[in-house]
Image (tube, coloured by chain):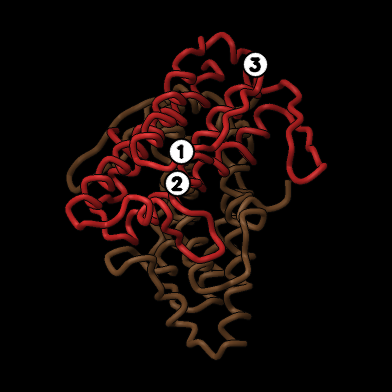
Chain colours: A red, B brown
Amino acid sequence: MPFYDSVVPAYLQMLASLSAGLKKAEAYAAAKKIEPAVLLGTRLFPDMLPLSRQIQLSCDFATKGSARLSGSEVPAVPDTETTFDELQQRIGRTVDYLKNYKPAQFDGGETREITFPTGPGKTTTMSGQQFLTSFSLPSFYFHVTTAHGILRMCGIDVGKRDFLGAQ
Amino acid sequence: MPFYDSVVPAYLQMLASLSAGLKKAEAYAAAKKIEPAVLLGTRLFPDMLPLSRQIQLSCDFATKGSARLSGSEVPAVPDTETTFDELQQRIGRTVDYLKNYKPAQFDGGETREITFPTGPGKTTTMSGQQFLTSFSLPSFYFHVTTAHGILRMCGIDVGKRDFLGAQ
């Protein structure tokens, strides 16, 4: 089984679900006359990151995870999005970026030594498989699920089936 | 890289983080004189499942995912826990169950055809890799992250670093 299959489809599935949830959120905000910026600024708790950042970070973990696991250059993407449209475009660009990869680019990625930042002035080195399993996927799912939780908390009609997307 | 490495360590890492979060929650409830049953019954939103069920489901996805991917019998575990202690025991039993597996039991699991329930009277069949990537891991992380979100929402001092556990 190519290592690609453990990586890119996981990101793509959840980014599609995130985009669909965000579309529902936009329609909901319009129907309820909620300022988009208020909905996108909603947090589960005051010292957590708002919905917009959860989306940016989901994109970021997908992009950087794929880049590191394929030995590609890690792109620096500025977090400038403030509207539904801009966040949808960010997700769209991330999806395009991921779809650009050929499965073969991930061959051997599971044993590649990966060094990545884990705090201010701190890096950690581990195998690609360990990086994927212990850091990249859980971080990615953390932000996608937290975004979903914020949508739920706002009363938007998304359930676990929407979270998982089509099976 | 053995397929085991994509499966069991992912579950074990997050169950340890869940157990640590639950321990903080218990101390917090005691300090704040919050009824344990109230904290364990907290939900992100009224029609979502409470903390106790998020923990039971995390255990369930770890157990059933490992059983299916190793071709083992899928254990039926009743959801009877109502206290911090009982939930810690449930997590502990799940960890013991997972640690009992030998890596070789997962060999070939990525290409094994897996049929699993996806709704009332409905099953889906896919390869082990696809089952892991598109269903088992995202479902597992969904419940672990939602449990974490509930702890955060209750004001318990857990952050993303706690969520990820030791790197």
Labelled disc at residue B141 = none
Q: Which of B92 and A59 is in front in this view?
A: A59
| Residue B7 placement: quadrant | top right
Residue A95 image point, x, y percent: 42, 24
Q: Do labels 2 and 3 share a chain?
A: yes
Is mark 1 in CB contact (under 8 Å) with mark 3? no
The three-letter code of the residue at mark 2 reads Ser
Which residue lies under the disc numbered 3? A72
The kind of residue on which mark 3 rests is Ser
* CA distance for labels 2 and 3: 27 Å
Relative depth, front residue between A96 and B87: A96
Mark 2, secondary structure of its residue? helix
Q: Is mark 3 on a helix, strand or loop?
A: loop
Crowd around label 3: few <14 · some 14–19 · many ≥20 (10 Å): few
Instruction: Determine the residue positioned at 28% across, 45% down.
Output: A161
- Quadrant of the image for the N terminus of chain B? top right
- Between label 2 and label 3, give the one nearer the viewer: 2
Choose mark 1 or mark 2, whichever is in front: 1
Mark linked to residue A81? 1
Q: Are marks 1 and 2 in contact (CB under 8 Å)?
A: yes
Q: Residue sitting at 57 percent across and 53 percent down?
A: B97
Do the residues marked 1 and 3 share a common chain? yes
Residue A42 is situated, as x and y percent measured from the top left of the image, at 41, 58
Tag 2 residue: A52
Nearer the N terminus, badge 1 or badge 3? Answer: 3
Task: Say which of marks 1 and 3 sits in front.
Answer: 1
Name which residue type carries label 1.
Glu
Viewer-closest of B84 and A106: A106
- Around disc 2, counting alpha carbons within 10 Å, would you say few (fewer than 14), some (14 to 19), or many (20 or more)? many
